[in-house]
Amino acid sequence: MERVLSSRASELDKDTASTIILLASSEMTKTKDLVWDWQQAASGVLVAVGRQFISKVMEELLRRLHPGTLPHCAVLHTLASLSVANAFGVVPFLPSVLSSLLPVLGVAKQDTVRVAFCSALQRFSEGALEYLANLDRAPDPTVRKDAFATDIFSAYDVLFHQWLQSREAKLRLAVVEALGPMSHLLPSERLEEQLPKLLPGILALYKKHAETFYLSKSLGQILEAAVSVGSRTLETQLDALLAALHSQICVPVESSSPLVMSNQKEVLRCFTVLACSSPDRLLAFLLPRLDTSNERTRVGTLQVVRHVINSAAAQMEDKKPFILSSMRLPLLDTNSKVKRAVVQVISAMAHHGYLEQPGGEAMIEYIVQQCALPPEQEPEKPGPGSKDPKADSVRAISVRTLYLVSTTVDRMSHVLWPYLLQFLTPVRFTGALTPLCRSLVHLAQKRQEAGADAFLIQYDAHASLPSPYAVTGRLLVVSSSPYLGDGRGAAALRLLSVLHPNIHPLLGQHWETTVPLLLGYLDEHTEETLPQEEWEEKLLMFLRDTLAIISDNAWICQLSLELCRQLPCYDEAPQEKNFLYKCIGTTLGAASSKEVVRKHLQELLETARYQEEAEREGLACCFGICAISHLEDTLAQLEDFVRSEVFRKSIGILNIFKDRSENEVEKVKSALILCYGHVAARAPRELVLAKVESDILRNICQHFSTKVLGIKVETKDPALKLCLVQSVCMVSRAICSSTQAGSFHFTRKAELVAQMMEFIRAEPPDSLRTPIRKKAMLTCTYLVSVEPALDEQARADVIHGCLHSIMALLPEPKEEDGGCQKSLYLETLHALEDLLTSLLQRNMTPQGLQIMIEHLSPWIKSPRGHERARALGLSALLLRYFLEHLRVSALVPFHNLGLLIGLFSPRCADLWPATRQEAVDCVYSLLYLQLGYEGFSRDYRDDVAERLLSLKDGLVHPDPAILFHTCHSVGQIIAKRLPPDQLISLLLTMFEALGDPEKNCSRAATVMINCLLQERGGVLQEKVPEIVSVLRSKLQEAQGEHVLPAAQHSVYLLATQHCAAVVSSLLGSPLPLDSHTCMLWRALAVEPRLAAQVLGLLLEKMSRDVPFKESRAFLLGRTPDRVATLLPLSATCALFEVMSTPAAGPAVLELYPQLFVVLLLRVSCTVGVQLPRNLQAQERRGASPALATRNLEPCSSAVDTLRSMLLRSGSEDVVQRMDLEGGWELLRTSAGHEEGATRLARAMAEHAGPRLPLVLKTLACTHSSAYENQRVTTTAFLAELLNSNVANDLMLLDSLLESLAARQKDTCASVRRLVLRGLANLASGCPDKVRTHGPQLLTAMIGGLDDGDNPHSPVALEAMLGLARLVHLVESWDLRSGLLHVAIRIRPFFDSVTVESADLQGCCFAGPGSPHPRRWSSGRHLSASLGTLTRSATETVRTSSWTRWWAGWRPCCCTCRTLRPPWPAFALRMCGPNLACEELSAAFQKHLQEGRALHFGEFLNTTCKHLMHHFPDLLGRLLTTCLFYFKSSWENVRAAAPLFTGKHHPLPHPHAARQPRLMPPLHRVPGAALGAQAAAAGGPGPAHCGAPDPAEGPGPRGADEGC
C-alpha cells in the first residue's frame, strides 16, 4: 500500500485519504507494545499520504499527542519521517509538536522511548534547517531560527546533561546524532556557552565507541555551527580537536566497512572547517608529522594535506613553498602506501599550481620514478572491493596521475614540455616510457597546435635534454619489444612520429605514412602472436628507409656513434640489445665512410660481452647486416681482429686463469663463427659463393677446431658447437638460395653433414636441453639440397640418426613447464619435418617414399604413445608433401600401397587421439596417391575417400564400441579403393600388426582384416595358403586374447569363399596340432552349412590317400613296419577339432553315415600303425604347452575322433556304453580290435538303431576294400548286428545276410571266420528266422568246416561253434545231408595232438568255470546237436554209416580222461540215448555224470562189453581207428588207446613169438602193458582211474597213475 500511495498519491481524493489516515493511525497505535514490522508499515502509509495531505495527517497525529502523557513510539517515528519527507509541510506544525513533547521528556525512562525522542528531535532539526535554507520556496518565508531556539535548547539540556550520560551505547549515539543538527538551531550565546562542555564531551566518546562515524558527523556539524557564529571558544579547543581528528584519520581504512569510509570523510570535513578558520595552526600541526617514520601517521597526514590543498585552496595559496619543502622526506619513503599518498598529494599540487614553484621538478621526477616501477614490485593484495588487482598500485596511480596532469591541467604544459624528454634515455626510467611517451605526444600535439616555434626544441637552452640521435635510437630500440610496459612500442613510435621536426626536417612525409602502418601491424597482433623477427625486420626497414631519405653521412655517422654509446644501457635487456646491434649494423651499412665502418666494427669486437649469448648473436647480426654493403671490409675486419694484439692479449691474460681462459676463448670464437655465418647469410649471393669455401668456411673451421701439438682437439663447449651449427646452416642456406646453386659444387658437404650428425648423436636422446640438434637438422636440410647428392648409406644414416635423436624425447612439455621449452620442442620437431621432406624431395618416387616410411616404421609400432604420435605425424606430413608434389607422367602402379596402408590403418584405434587422427590422414593421402597414379587429376575428389574425413570425429570418442565401428568403416573404404594386386600385401602387413604391443591397434587390425576378407576375399583364392600360414605363425607370436577370436573369424570368412583352399591349407599344419590351429579348425564349424562342407572335404581328404605305408627298418626278412601317412592323420585330427564344436552338431547329423563309416574304417586300418619317426620323436620329447594335449597315435586319434563324432551327433548312450565296457580301449589294440568293433556294433544296435540303415548302406561300399583290416572290422560290425533283433526290426536282415554271404570267399581267414560268426548270431538275434534261412546257414557252416587244408583252422572252429548254435533251430531234414560230413569234420579236433589243436579243443569244449562263457555254451549246444544228429541217424542212416559214425565218436572215449573241461564225456552222455542201446546209454549216464570223478578203467570195461555185445560188426572198424591213436603225441591218449583196444581183443598166448605190428612196443606205452595184463586176467583194470592232477598235465606220469 505504501508503494502504491507513493507512486499514485496525486490521484487520491480527500475522503479516501481520510479513511486511509484513520485506518493507518488506528492500526499503528492499537497496541502500546512495540510491534515494529506492522507499526512501521502503518507509519509508512501515513508518510506516503502526508506528502499530499499533510494537514490531515498532522491533524490525526497531533490528536494522538496527549499533554502530560508519553506519546506512542510509532507516532514519534511517523512525525520524524514526515519532517524529512515533507519539511515544508511539517515545520509550521513544529511549535505545536514541540510544546506537546518537551514537557514529557523528563518522564521518558525507557531507552527505546528516549531513542525515539532523539531520532524525532534530529529529524525535526534537519527539517527546520532545510526549511530555513530554502525560504524562497517555503510556504511561510517569515519563519526564523528563533522560533525554535528556546524549545531546542530545552531539549538540548535534557539530552546533553541527562541522556548522554547513559550507559546504553545506542542511546548515547542517538543523542550525539541529534546534537549535531540541533546545534545549528541553538541561540548563538547558548552555543558559545555550551562549546567548552560540548566539544570535550563529544571527543571523549571517541574512546568509548568503535563505530565513530556518527560522532565525527555530529562533530563536524557542531564545528560548522561554531564557526558560523564566530566562536572564540573554538581556539581554545583547537589542539584537542586536531589531535583527536588526526588519530581518527590515521586509523587503517577497511573498504569493506562503509561506516569506516564514511567516518574518514567526516573527519576530513572537520579538517576542512578548521583549515578555513585556522590554516596556520592546522599546518603547524600537520607538516611536522610528515617527518615521522610511522606509516599510519605519515599516510594519514598526507591525506589531510591533499584534502586541505583541494578544499582550502585560497587559504593555502601563500603556503605553497612551505608545503613543497615539507614533502622532502615523504619523497624518500619506500612504503607503497606512503608512495600512493604522496602521488595523490602531487596530483592535487599540480592542479593548484604548486609544481610551478621552485622544487616542483622534484615532484614530477618522483611521479616518473613511480611510473617506472616494475610490475612485479606492485602490491598483490589490493582492497577486496577492487575489480582490477593492480588498479590501485603505486605505478597505476602514478601513470594515471602523469597522464591526467599532462592532458587536463593546462597550466602544466609549459612545465612538462620539453622537461619530460630528459626521462626518455636514462635506463632507470625505462618502465615509465609508455606513460612518458603518451604524455609527450599529447604535449607535442598541443605545442604543434600552438605553432611551430613553440614546438621546436631549443637544445642550446635545454642542455639536459637528449639529442635527436639519442631520442631516435632510444625510441626505435624500445619499439622492438612493443608490448612490454603496457605497449611502449606503439607509444614510442607515435612519439617518434610526432617529434620528426625535431629529429630531421626531411622525415615528416615518410614517417606520417610509415608509422601508421607499423602501428596497424601491432594492432593486428598480440604479444603471443607477434612474429618477433618479422617485426624487427619491419623496424630495420623503417630505419633503413629513414637513413636513405636523410642521405647525410655525417648525420648517419653521428647516429651510429650514439647507438654504440647506448649499448651498455641494455645490458639487462638482451633482446633489445640484440636489436640495437642490428640497428648499428643497418646504420653502418648506410654509411659511406669505410673508415668509420671499420672503426666502429673494431670497437664492437673489442667491447662486446662475449659471455652473453644474446650479445654474441647481436654482434653477429650487426656484422651480417653491415656485410650487405661492406662485405670486403667486414671480412677484412674479422680477420684483422683475429690477428690483432687485442685478441691475442685477451687470450694471454685469460691464460693466467687457466679454467676461465678456455671458456672465455671459446665464447670469443663462438662470436666470430657466428659473425661469419651471418655474413654469409646476409651478403649478396653473387658475391658470397666465391668466398664460401675460401674465406668463410675456412675461418669457421679454423676457429672451431684447435690443434695441440699437431693433434686436432674438438671443443666441449655447447655454445661453440651451437654457433658452428648455426653458421654452417646459414652458409648452406645462402648457397641454396643462390641462383647459381645448381652449378655450385660444395666439396665440403659430406664432411659437414658428418659433423652435424656427430653433434646430433651426441645429444641425450631422452631430453631436449639445447637447440643444437634443431640447428643441426636445419643445417642438414639445406646441405642435402646442395650438390653433390649424398649416397644411399649417408642418407640412411642421416634419417636414422635424426629420428633416433628426436623420437625418443619425452612428450611435448606443457605450458606450465616453460614456454621456451615447448617452443624449442616444436621448433626441433619442425626442423626434423623439414629435413625429412628435403630428403624425400630428392627421391620423389614410390620407392623413395617407402624408404622414408620404413625408417619411421619402428617408431610407428613403438610401445610408447608419444613416439607413435610423433611418427604418425611425420608420416602424415611426408604423405601430404608427396601428394602435393606428385607428378605422374605415365600410368604406373603404386606398388607399395598395400604395405603402407597396412602399416597406418591399425593406428586408427591407438590410445592417443592425436595418433588416431594422423593415421586417418595417412590413409586418406595414400588413397589419393593411388588415384593420382591411376591418372586422376590433383583436384579430383573421390566420394569414398572423402568419407574418411567424416570418420575422424568418431575416432575422438573414447568408447571402444564407437572406435572399432569407425575402424570397420575405414576398412570398408580401403576395401573399395584398394587395387586387387595390393590386397595380399595389405593383409600380410596387417597380420604383422596382430602382435602389436598396443592392444587397441591389434584389435583394429583384426577388425580391418575381417572387413577386407568379407569385402574382397573372393579374389584371394590363390593366396589362401599364404594367408593361413601367416595367420598361424602370427597366432604363435601374438599375446592378446582378442587375436584368436578374430583369427577364427578370418578363417571363417575365407572358408565361406574358398572352403577347399582353406581346408587344404589348414591340413598342411604340422602335427601335432597346436592349440591355435585347433581353434582355427573349430572356427569352421560355427555355421552349419560351412561345417558340413568342411566335414565333407575332410572325409574326402581322408579317403583319398593311403592310410599307411610299409617300410622295412633293418633286415629284409623282418616284417615291414606300417607308418601312418600324414594327410589322413591330419584330416582325422581336424575332424576331431571341427566336431568338438557344439555348433557342428547339425552338420555332423547330416553326414552321420559317412562320418561313422569313414572313421570306423580309419580306426580299423590304423590298428598297429606307427607314427612317422619325426612325430615319434616329438611325442617322446613331450608336447609344448602351445600344442594340443590329444594323443597323436594314429589309431587312438581315430578312436577319439569317432567317439567325438558320436557325442556331437547325439549318440551319448553309445559312447557311455562303450566307456563302461572298455570298448574304446579294445578298438585301439590289435588283440581286442575285433571285440571292440563287436561291442561298438552291439552299442549301436541298442542305442542308435534308427541310424543303422544309412550306416549299412554306406558301409556296403567298403566290402571290396583293399585293406584286410577294414574288411575285418566291417565284417565284425555287421556280424554283431545280427546278434540283435534290431536287424529284423529295421528290415536289415536280408541285406546283412547278403553282405555276409558275399564275404564267405574272402581271402582273409578272419573275415571268413567273422562271417560265420555273424551267420550264427542269427540264432540269438533272430531265432525265428533261422528256419527260414536254415539251408543257407548250414551250407555256410559246413563250408566253414571244409575251410582250407588245415583241419584245425579258426574258421572251421567258428563253423563248429556256429553249427552248435544253429543245429537245434533248423529243420531236421536240413541236417540229414550234412550229418556224416559233420561227424567226419569233428573227428580231427580229437585227433590233433598239437598245442594249437589242444587250444582249439579247449575253445570248442570249454566247460564250467571256463573264461570263455560263449564257447562253453557253444560246446553244450554242439553236444546236444550231436544227440539230435544221432537220433536222426537211427532213423535214416544205414548200418555201414554207423560204422563211420562210431568211428567219429571213438576219440571221445579215448579223451574222456584227458581234456579239461570233460567235453567228450558230456558229448557221450548226450548221445547215449540215441545209440539204439539202452545198456550203453545207461553206462554213459552212470559213469560220465557231470561234477563226478571218472573211474576210467571201470568206464572203459563197461563200454567195451556193451559194444562187443550189441555192435559186434563195428569192432573191426573201431579197432582199426584205435590203432591210429597209438602214435598220438599225447601220452595219455597213447596210454588210453591200447587200453581201449585191449578191452576188445583177448591177449595172445604168453609164449607167442611176437606182438602184432600195429601195436607200439609195450616198453614205450606203459599203460598198454597194464591194459594187456588186465585183459588177459579177464578182470578189470586198476581199481580206480581218476583224473590226472591238473598241475602235472597230460604227461606220462599222469598216464601211468591213471592206468
Image: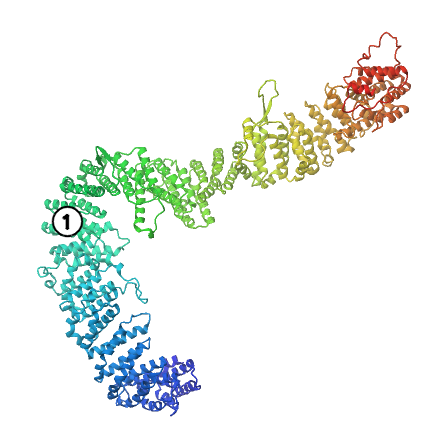
Which quadrant of the figure contains the N terminus? bottom left
Residue 1411's place in the image compared with 29, above or below, is above
* Nearer-the-camera pick, 683 or 1500: 1500
From where the camera sits, is residue 133 visible?
no
Question: Going by the image, does 1302 lie left or right of 311?
Answer: right
Q: Is residue 1504 left or right of residue 270?
A: right
Q: Is residue 121 visible?
A: yes
User: What secondary structure is found at the residue carrying circle 1?
Assistant: helix
Q: Tell me the quadrant of the picture where the C terminus can be found.
A: top right
Please give left or right for residue 742 compared with residue 902 in the image.
Answer: left
Q: Residue furthest bottom?
A: 67
Residue 1247 horizontal/vertical position (percent): 69, 38
Question: Which image quadrant for residue 373?
Answer: bottom left
Classify residue 1546 by image quadrant: top right
Nearest to the observer: residue 782 or residue 1573: 1573
Q: Residue placed farthest to the top in the image?
A: 1553
Applied colour scheme: rainbow
**Mark 1 highlights which residue?**
587
The one of 751 and 200 positioned closer to us in this rendering: 200
How far across and down, in percent of the image, does residue 501 sit? 12, 58
Q: Position of residue 86 (x, y in %)?
A: 32, 84
